[in-house]
Amino acid sequence: MSMVEFFLFMFEQWYLSLPLLIFISLFFASLSKKGGKKISTHELVNINNKGLAKLVDIRKSDEFNAGHIAGSINIPFSDFERRQHELPNREDISIVLICETGSQSGNAGEILQKSGFKDTLILSGGMSEWRLNNLPLI
């Protein structure tokens, strides 16, 4: 089936296609908000410089030790549920979750949200994005 035939089918069967497209859109929208709001590296630098965030790197300890963002603490995802009590649950401090690509941080954010944390943020693109922007590491 060619692309033209596919789109023609979708157009002709609009009453089937429309609910499918709505479902797919809602599914991806819910995934993008999973665990907290995604923020850019620029936004992270701004809130971190103002002292409004606690940075939590959820990568494995050896990855963290190889290079991490200044001021971040390491709580590996495998220990996250057990150690989440170490994080401040205050309205004036955002918890910023950092992983390698930004994909695992949503899971950690959900754990925090279920425990009553209200302001969880996720570094979009994770450490990969941070390195891509040539931002400093310790």
Image (spheres, helix red, strand yellow):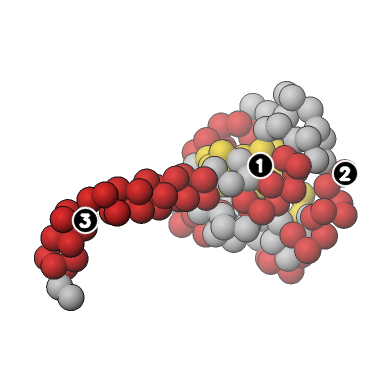
Residue annotated with mark 1: 96
Is label 2 in a helix, a strand or a loop? helix
User: Which comes sooner in the sequence, label 2 or label 1?
Assistant: 2
Query: Residue 57, percent across and down?
Result: 70, 53
Camera sees residue 7: no
Which of pointers 2 and 1 indicates the residue nearer the eye? 2
Q: Residue at x 66, y 54 (%)?
A: 107
- Asked if disc 3 and disc 2 are in contact, CB closer than 8 Å, the reply is no
Label at residue 85: 2
The disc label shown at residue 13, or none: 3
Q: Mark 3 or mark 2, which has the lower sequence index?
A: 3
Determine whether 92 is above or below 7 in the image.
Answer: above
The quarter holding residue 89 reads top right
**Residue reaching furthest to the top:** 92
Question: Crowdedness of circle 2 by 10 Å Cα count: few (<14), some, many (20+)?
Answer: few
- Residue 83: % across, % down: 86, 51
Kind of residue at badge 2: His
Q: Residue 10, relative to residue 73: is it above or below?
A: below
